[in-house]
Structure formats: structure tokens, C-alpha cells
Image (cartoon, rainbow, N blue to C red):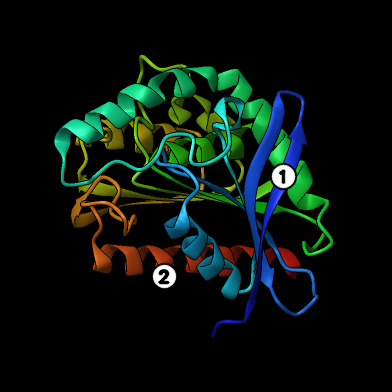
Amino acid sequence: MTSPVTFEQIDLSLPDGTADSYFAHPDDGARHPGVLFFMDAYGLRPWLREMVETIAAHGYTVLAPNIFYRSGRAPVVPMPDQSDPDAHAAFFAALSPMRAALTPEKAIEDANAYLDRLAASEFVIPGLLATTGYCMGGRLALRTAAAFGGQVAAAASFHGGYLAADDRSDSPHHDAASMTAELFIAHADQDGSMPPDQIERLEAALDTANVRYTSVVYPDAPHSFTMRDTAAFREDAYERHLRDLFALLDRTFRTTAE
């Protein structure tokens, strides 16, 4: 069952600048559980607005910040032509310094501010929050859950990349022992950024830390399978992702409310 939604584009004042953000909640004037939505590398755009509104319509208040705000307002770099491999490569080349500016330390500082702003909203019920993220945002969703366990009850990652890369300091598997949230992690079976050996390493780290989690591999799915405005989009995988996300959120907030 879905509800009518109120959507706004808001600005968050942070120590390093202003983060333009999407903000959506059910149009009933009531408080709802808060969800921090971490974008993919393509940034805030019409499709992400639709995703944010879809989650809000299910009964949640959702904040999706432009995590590259230090480099400008969205779109920081316009979406490339998905049919042109050269345009795709040029997009990520242009994005490289902006991603570099979002250091692992800055990303966590920002996440702290995003959680605080979400929790302070008149449309968010007091208590624990959730995170969900896509591609690089999946990594941020899990890192946020590890860094702020006292605030985050559930965290989801969809086609997150480099979640168990030993040579990366921002790989979430390093912080498994700090995770108290329930996790849902959906991998793509055609994703070079999260190959089977990393999936096994991530699951081993979570098992050792006794983290409550579900780790699944969606079949016939490439990286970015949830993104309708990319060539990687898969309708069945996108719909499955919604079912899995809502099951996690509904289960978590029904339990914490009791």
C-alpha cells in the first residue's frame, strides 16, 4: 500500500558547504521512520527522485543528499550518453577529482551531519534510522551503519562496489565488528567491482563479527541494475530490490517500535 508523497529539494548547511538534497515523506503531516539514501556516482537526477518518492510512498521519510556537494550542485557532471562508451569513460574521468575530494574521513563526517538533520526533522519519528545506498552509495550505507551504530538500525546496499577490498581503507568489511544494525546486501552476478572472492570475504567478516545480515546475489544482473536511466537497468532486479528493501525496513521498524 502506498501513500501520496510530499517532495522537496532542500539545502543542508554543512561545515564544508551546502549539500543540495532530495527530501520526501508521506503527505499526511505525521512522523515516519527516517531513511538516509546514498546516491550512486551519477548523482541526484530525475530517476533518483523517483526512487526516493517510491520509498517515501511506502511510509518513510527519506533524505538523499548530493554527496559531491563540495564540487557543486547536482548535476555535478551531466549524465553521459549510455550508448557511447567514450562518453561514459569521460564522465568518470571528470568525476575522479570530485570523488577524491570525498575522502573516507569526510564521508563519515558528512554522514554524521546527514543523520542528525534527518533525525531532527518534524517528519521523522524519534529513535533509530536506516540507510540504503547504491553502487558507491552502498559502501557508504554500510560504513555509516558501522560508524553510527547507536543511530542506525538497518542498512541496505544494492550493487555496492568494493565492500571487501583489503587494499581500501574505506572497505566496510574492515569495520564489521562495529556493526550493530541488521544488513541487507544485494550483489549483482555480473559486477567486476564485487567479484565472488570479495563476497566471500565480506560474509566471513560479518559472520566473525556476529552481524545480522542477508547477502544475496541477483542473477542476470549487472552493476547498476536498479538505475533505469542506465544501460544496466533490469526491471525484475529493480522490483526485487524494492521488495527486499521494504521487507528489511518494515521488519526493523516494526520491531523497534514494539
Horizontal side of 256 relative to 234 (left or right) equals right
**SS under mark 1:** strand
Horizontal side of 142 relative to 34 (left or right) equals left
**SS under mark 2:** helix
- Write down the quadrant of residue 237 in the picture: bottom left
**Where is 8 relative to 69, above or below?**
below
Coordinates of residue 81 in the picture (x, y in percent): 24, 44
Q: Which residue is mark 2?
A: 243
| Nearer to us in this view, 205 or 99 | 99
- Write down the quadrant of residue 78 in the picture: top left
Task: Report the Cα–Cα distance between label 1 and label 2.
Answer: 30 Å
- Write down the quadrant of residue 92 in the picture: top left
Nearest to N terminus: mark 1 or mark 2: 1
Say whether residue 210 is visible: no
Q: Which residue is mark 1?
A: 11
Coordinates of residue 220 in the picture (x, y in percent): 15, 56
Residue 142: numbered disc:
none
Q: Nearer the viewer, mark 1 or mark 2?
A: 1
